[in-house]
Every structure is written in structure tokens, then in C-alpha cells.
Image (tube, grey):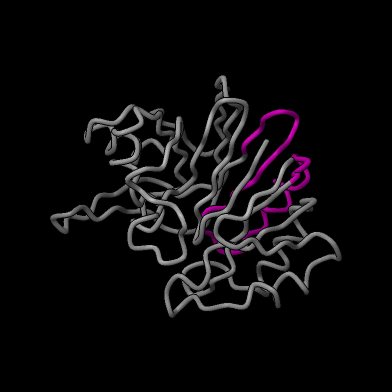
Amino acid sequence: MKVSYHGHSVVKLEVGNKTILIDPFISGNDQCDLNADTVKTDVILLTHGHNDHVGDTVSIAKRNDALVLAPVELADYLSSQGLNTHPANLGGSQSFDFGTVKLTKAFHSSSYTDENGTVHYTGMPAGILFYAEGKTIYHAGDTGLFSDLKLIGELNDIDLAFLPIGDNFTMGPDDAVIAAEWIQAKQIVPVHYNTFPVIQQDPNAYVEKLKSGTGKVMNAGDALEL
């Protein structure tokens, strides 16, 4: 499995002949190296409805005829926009030919503002556990620190985790250090920082606080093999 990071919270997974995008906020994201008009994907996974996570989902999904898995209210809204969606909810999992997806709790909020300025309620925010090829990836989405992260770590042998460190809207570096201790992932990649002035952070300073060898700063376009 090839895993690449593309700024903010954008992650791409390549499993066999399938490509999966998580939270494809590309247009308007100076941290991202992808092009929303040309990126190819078979599946889009969404953690919640905020515009900096839904991003270019509608245009990308329509152009690629991609499946979109999202929390049920967000999936329902995107279905009304003509997308092929799979609704899910917290604690539920579903297996597909590209892997198994399970939504976890995340402490945050979730709404989507359309091009007319109308705000749509998009259900509970989520994190994502992705299982494929004997590996487990955890994308925490946007979240503050919460004690059930311990349970996620206890119940899963996590190979790679993406944790937000930006503060203000999510947990900051200090809380994300605690989160890393609780989930016990083999590798931790910080995300959701430096996209906006209010979430400026030093990712290298963060990984230096983690257990030796577990932290990894990924720049946009960096990839690793699991």
C-alpha cells in the first residue's frame, strides 16, 4: 500500500489498482500539490462536512465516477448533488474490494456552506480507520483530545496515524502528543497545520516530542510504503 500526504488533511491511499482520497481540500489550499481538475481517484472518504475537508469532492467525484463514503447526513447531502455515496455512522464498518472502512468518534463540529452561502448540517464528525493488506491506518479527522482515543489504540494495531496539531479548531501539539501516546501507532504524521494563520505550528518540534522513531513529518507529495 502506498500512502501519500498532500497538505492540510489530504491523504491519498493506493491499494492494488484502487486509489482513495481522504478529505480532498485542493482548490484554495496553498499547502496542496494536487490539481483538482486532473486528480484521479476511485473512492473519496470524508471525515466531516467542513469546507476545508469536503473541498473539491463534488467535482472530483463526478469526473471520476467515484464512490464517496461519508457520515450519513453528509452523504445524503452529497447524494442530492448527484454523487454516488455510501452513508456510514460512528462505530460502523463496511468492507469493499479496496479495504474496510470504519468511522470513529471525533470531537468537533460539522456543517457545509454551499456556493450560495447556505449552511447545511452534516451530522457527526468522524475519524477513519482504514484496513487493507494487513495494515491499519487511522485518520483522526478534526478533533480535540478525548479519552476514547485510548480505546481506539487498544482495539487496533495502528501502523500509521494522521493527527491534527493546528490548535484553535482542533487539538494542538501538546494534546496531540498525548493522543499519540494513547493510540500507540507505529508511525505518527501531523496534519491540519499552517494552512491558515490561526493554525501555524512547527511540525518538526511536534515530532521531536513523540516517542523516538514514531514521528514523521510529511511534506505535500511525500509518500511511504506500508
Vertical position of residue 12 compared to residue 102: above or below = below
Q: Residue at x 32, y 54 (%)?
A: 111
- What's the residue at 46%, 65% (across, down)? 31
Name the residue: 47% across, 39% down.
45
Q: Is residue 123 left or right of residue 193?
A: left
Residue 147 drawn at (x, y percent): 67, 57
- Vertical order, 186 against 165 (above or below): above
**Relative to residue 90, is residue 62 drawn left or right?**
left
Q: Quadrant of residue 145?
A: bottom right
Tally the numbered discs.
0
Considering every residue shown, the one lying at the far top of the view is 97
Estimate the x, y position of residue 194 in percent, counting from the top left.
Answer: 50, 73
**Which stretch appears magenta?**
130-159
Q: In the displayed image of the protein, which residue is found farthest to the right?
A: 212
Q: How far across and how far down the image is residue 8, in percent?
A: 49, 61
Placement of the C terminus among the 4 image quadrants: top right
Q: Is 21 within the magenta?
A: no
Front residue of this view, candidates 90 and 176: 176
Residue at 45 percent across and 70 percent down: it is 195
Pick the front one: 192 or 21: 21
Q: Give the x, y percent position of residue 144.
A: 56, 64
Q: Considering only vertical position in the picture, is 95 above or below 79?
A: above
Q: Quadrant of the N terminus?
A: top right
Q: Is residue 145 found inside the magenta-colored segment of the image? A: yes
Q: In this orientation, which residue lies closer to the viewer: 10 or 124?
A: 10
Q: Is residue 124 left or right of residue 122?
A: right
